[in-house]
Image: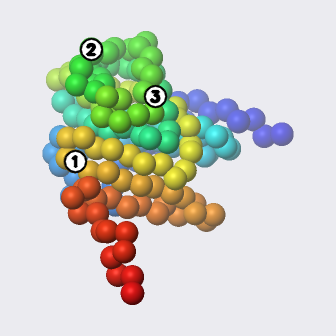
Amino acid sequence: MTPRIVHLDELSLRPIKADEDRIPERYQGSQLAEIGEMLGARMLGYNLTVVPPGKAAFPAHSHYGNEEMFLILEGVGEVRIGEQIFPVRAGHVIACPTGGPETAHQLRNTSTDTVLTYLSVSTTNYPDLVLYPDSGKIGAVHYDNNGRAIRLRNRESDNLSYWDGET
């Protein structure tokens, strides 16, 4: 059996990109290494995320289908959970259970000169529904049998009616 082991310094970080080119300034420069799939994980996803000073890697969001956990490895920052903000530093473990706006979370690097590095672990239940409370978006994601992501994002006010386009 091939060992399912990797050392963090062997990972290849890549810039975090969404499905479009324009990334707001406050999210630019973060990097991510996907670990779970590389190791053959089946029910959990693992990522290493590196966030530059003064930035966040992702908008505040909550999952209705997947629970997340973060382990701060290096640096200082803050985590927003719902409307509350808590300071974090290396060694902190953060639980982000499923739920609505009250569980929305975001990690931000508050340092002016040091990266914030953390390990993310999450369940991989798909489809997943994701709420973005600051922008009023909601999104759904599912991975087909070929690993291709199918993503939908909109605002509730933009939803089509159930009978739209039906004759």
Residue designated by label 1: 136
User: Is the Cβ of the residue at disc 1 closer than 8 Å to that at disc 2?
Assistant: no
Q: Quadrant of the N terminus?
A: top right
Residue designated by label 3: 97
Q: Is residue 156 above or below residue 160?
A: above
Earlier-in-chain disc, 1 versus 2: 2
Give the residue drawn at x 58%, y 30%: 7
Q: Amino acid at mark 3?
A: Pro
Residue designated by label 2: 87
Q: Is residue 105 above or below residue 140?
A: above
Q: Amino acid at mark 1?
A: Gly
Could you say where residue 161 lies in the image, as x and y percent from the top left? 31, 68
Disc 1 packing (10 Å; few <14; some 14–19; many ≥20): few
Tell me if residue 21 can be seen. Answer: no
**Left or right of 66, for residue 109:** left
Give the residue drawn at x 27%, y 14%: 87
Earlier-in-chain disc, 3 versus 1: 3
Nearest to the observer: residue 27 or residue 166: 166
Q: Amino acid at mark 2?
A: Pro
Nearest to the observer: residue 47 or residue 139: 139
Q: CA–CA distance between discs 1 and 2?
A: 25 Å
Mark 3 falls on what kind of element?
loop
Give the residue drawn at x 56%, y 37%: 123
Quarter of the image for residue 81 reads: top left
